[in-house]
Structures are given as C-alpha cells and as structure tokens.
C-alpha cells in the first residue's frame, strides 16, 4: 500500500548535556531552539509554532509560554505547553504534525529542557532514583512508596514473577544499551559492562539495581517539524513522520488488571502502525523510552515484537545491540546515553534518519519506531518515522 508522509523533522538542536548546573531550563531551551532553527536552514521569522515540553517535576515558571519572547519568536499561530509526563515530547511532534496537516502552521519548534541536577544535589540524583512519582495514593505513601523507582521495581517484580524470569533479563537490556553507548560520542557512560558488573551494582529497590536506572543530565533538545514540501528542500535524508498513536490504559489497581506489565503501548502501536501502513515486521529499529531496564522488556512485548514473557528470549535470539536483528536504543538510551525524558528517543531517531549517527549509523531505516511514556507506564505515545 502506498503511503505519504504527514510531516518531517528538518532540524535538531542540542545544548551540551552535562552533569553540572549552569543556567535555568528556559535559557537552555532558548539555545536549543536557535540551534534547531539554524540546523533546518531557517530563520526565526520562518517559525510559526512553538510547543513546549517541561519536566513534570518543574512548575510552569521553569518553561513558561513566555519562552516565545525569550527565543525571539513572533506572530506564532500555534503556542502551547504540552503536559503528558514522559510521553510529552512525542506528543509535541504529534500535535505539530496535526497542526501542519490542518493548515494551522507549517514550521513548528518542539523543545524540551530540564535541570534535574541542582547545586548541592544528593548522590541519589546521579541516577533516576530520586524522581518523584506523580499520582501517589495515600496508602502507597504510608508504605514508603515514594519515588518512580518504587513503581518500576514493582513492575519488574511482577514481570519476573509472572513469567518466571530473573534479573539476568534486566542485565541483558542494560548491557545492550551500554554497547550502543560506546559508539555514541554524546553518551555519558561508556565503560564496558558485563553480566557480573550488573550483578555487582547495588540494589536500589529490588529487583532493580543502579545499572537498571536512567542517567539524568541537564540540557535541552529541540526539533523543527515542517511540512513535507519544506522537508524535500531541507535535507538529503528527511526524517519523515508516517504514523502516530497514543494509548492510555490507566492504572486501575483492581483484581484482573495488571497495569504494571500490560500497558497502553499496545493501543499506541495499533494506531501508529495502521496510519503508517506497516506491521511490526516492517520496523527496522526502535528508540524506546527506557527510564528503567524493565521498560524495554515490556515495550518489546506490548509493541508486538514478541509474545508476553518472551522479550528476554527475543533479545538472546534476535539481538537488540550492535549487529542485532532489531537495533534498540542505538545511542545508549536512558540507561547509558542520557536521560532527557522523551527527547532522548527523538534526538537519536533524528540523528539516525539524518545520517548523522557516525559509528553507530544504521543503513536500513524505512520504518523506525519512536516511543515515549509517562507516569507508571500508563501514558503512551508513539511515532513511526522513516526516510
């Protein structure tokens, strides 16, 4: 079946991603916006839309709608702050695409910035273990269920118990990410990792170890989403968007529901694949949101690459690291690359599709799955992108 692209990412801007606090989030965002516009071969006056993605742990003042003025953008026909937790960056690209398709805008900047590492921060903030968890119940707080890692440790515990798996499966994900990170100049952790290294890493909330957790950085990432005609003239390898979907299954904690391991990713996949006229067998590579190692196992299953409980077998037989049949998180993902929430997956996808991924560059990129999720994996958004 023939298909037509809906929009394209024509520019990418990334500030330095560092472990030191230098300036506020909005200042980093302004820098990334300018870089993305320049990368797209455009001027600020060409931009007619701005979609802002702030970290859910920051209030609106960190990334206000006034960012338009700080960034030097005028006469916008589209302006909004998108708040969908970790799925927000993917949703900004979706909203930009819908605006372009409807004629509301033609060239939209989508930006994420965050400064989770503050002066005098604790050692816990070195990994994604101190992130507050949104929507906690009173009974959970009373039982010490304080942070995001508690929710994901519970999901991991449920997964391992239901499918009779071990933490070796989590290690396989972390090791594959590290192998990709070693090929990525932007990745923050490149030391080779073995199964023994993973097992020697300390428990944080069992069954998750430190090496199962994302590695936060301060910085900003922005992209320019353009109409298809602009894209044809802008890039030798445009990063086209062919399909998109969302899935919000909810977190109903009642008998018969398993929100920890049965997520809305399946819904997002069905819509995105149908729109892009593809099946899961057509996907050449994946850029998953993977704040914790368990996420990749569940994503592989919910997006249809293997049956529930079979992700570890899929990784062992097919391979998701360099040289594998299904490249996954080719920049090192959140675990070894850099944790910039949904912008991590987007930035790596754009670098791959723009043929800028250097030593980790993939050759076949007809269809790339790019995903984001938020909360306890209950908010999902996905894109099918390609050349």
Image: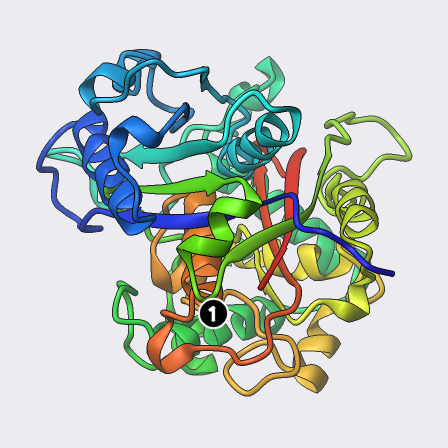
Q: Residue at x 42, y 45 (%)?
A: 343
In the shown orientation, is residue 297 left or right of residue 185? Answer: right
For the C terminus, which image quadrant?
Answer: bottom right
In the shown orientation, is residue 176 left or right of residue 158? Answer: left
In front here: 259 or 206?
259
Which residue does the numbered mark 1 point to in the structure image?
330
Q: Within the image, what quadrant is residue 259 found in?
A: top right
- On the image, the x and y values in percent for residue 26 come to 22, 25
Is there any visible trace of residue 96 in the rendered image? yes
In the orientation shown, which residue stands out farthest toward the right?
Answer: 256
Snapshot colouring: rainbow
- On the image, the x and y values in percent for residue 301 come to 76, 59
In front here: 195 or 359?
359
In the shown orientation, is residue 254 left or right of residue 329? Answer: right
Q: Is residue 118 above or below residue 372?
A: above
Is there any visible trace of residue 183 in the rendered image? no
Q: Residue at x 75, y 57 (%)?
A: 161
Q: Is residue 315 above or below residue 283?
A: below
For the N terminus, which image quadrant?
Answer: bottom right
Q: Is residue 191 above or below residue 84?
A: below
Q: Residue at x 40, y 24 (%)?
A: 48
- On the image, the x and y values in percent for residue 243 come to 70, 47
Q: Describe the element under mark 1 as helix, strand or loop.
A: loop
- On the image, the x and y values in percent for residue 378 come to 67, 33
Q: Residue at x 35, y 62 (%)?
A: 337
In front here: 287 or 93?
93
In the shown orientation, is residue 262 left or right of residue 235? Answer: right
- Other residues around mark 1 within 10 Å, as few (<14) / some (14–19) / many (≥20): many
In this figure, what is the number of numbered marks? Answer: 1
């Amino acid at each position: 079946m023939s298909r037509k692209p809906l929009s394209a990412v024509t520019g990418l801007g990334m500030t330095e991603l560092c472990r030191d606090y230098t300036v506020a989030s909005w200042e980093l965002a302004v820098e990334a916006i300018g870089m993305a516009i320049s990368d797209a071969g455009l001027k600020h006056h060409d931009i007619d839309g701005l979609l802002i993605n702030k970290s859910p742990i920051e209030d609106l003042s960190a990334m206000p709608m006034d960012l338009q003025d700080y960034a030097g953008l005028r006469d916008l026909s589209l302006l909004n702050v998108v708040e969908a937790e970790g799925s927000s960056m993917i949703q900004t690209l979706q909203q930009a695409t819908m605006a372009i398709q409807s004629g509301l805008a033609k060239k939209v900047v989508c930006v994420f910035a965050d400064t989770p590492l503050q002066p005098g921060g604790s050692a816990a903030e070195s990994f994604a273990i101190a992130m507050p968890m949104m929507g906690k119940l009173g009974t959970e707080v009373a039982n010490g269920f304080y942070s995001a890692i508690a929710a994901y440790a519970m999901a991991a515990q449920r997964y391992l118990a239901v499918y009779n798996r071990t933490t070796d499966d989590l290690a396989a994900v972390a090791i594959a990410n590290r192998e990709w990170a070693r090929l990525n100049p932007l990745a923050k952790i490149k030391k080779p990792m073995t199964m023994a290294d993973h097992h020697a890493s300390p428990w944080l909330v069992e069954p998750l170890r430190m090496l199962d957790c994302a590695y936060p950085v301060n910085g900003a990432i922005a992209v320019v989403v353009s109409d298809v005609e602009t894209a044809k003239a802008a890039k030798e390898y445009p990063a086209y968007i062919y399909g998109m979907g969302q899935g919000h299954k909810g977190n109903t904690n009642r008998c018969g529901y398993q929100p920890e391991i049965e997520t809305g990713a399946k819904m997002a996949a069905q819509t995105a694949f149908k729109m892009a006229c593809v099946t899961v067998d057509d996907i050449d590579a994946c850029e998953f949101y993977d704040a914790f190692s368990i996420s990749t196992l569940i994503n592989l299953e919910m997006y249809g690459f293997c049956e529930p409980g079979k992700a570890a077998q899929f990784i062992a037989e097919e391979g998701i690291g360099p040289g594998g049949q299904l490249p996954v998180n080719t920049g090192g993902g959140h675990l070894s690359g850099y944790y910039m929430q949904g912008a991590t997956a987007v930035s790596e996808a754009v670098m791959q599709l723009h043929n800028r991924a250097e030593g980790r560059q993939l050759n076949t990129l007809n269809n790339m799955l790019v995903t984001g999720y938020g909360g306890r994996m209950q908010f999902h958004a996905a894109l099918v992108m390609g050349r």
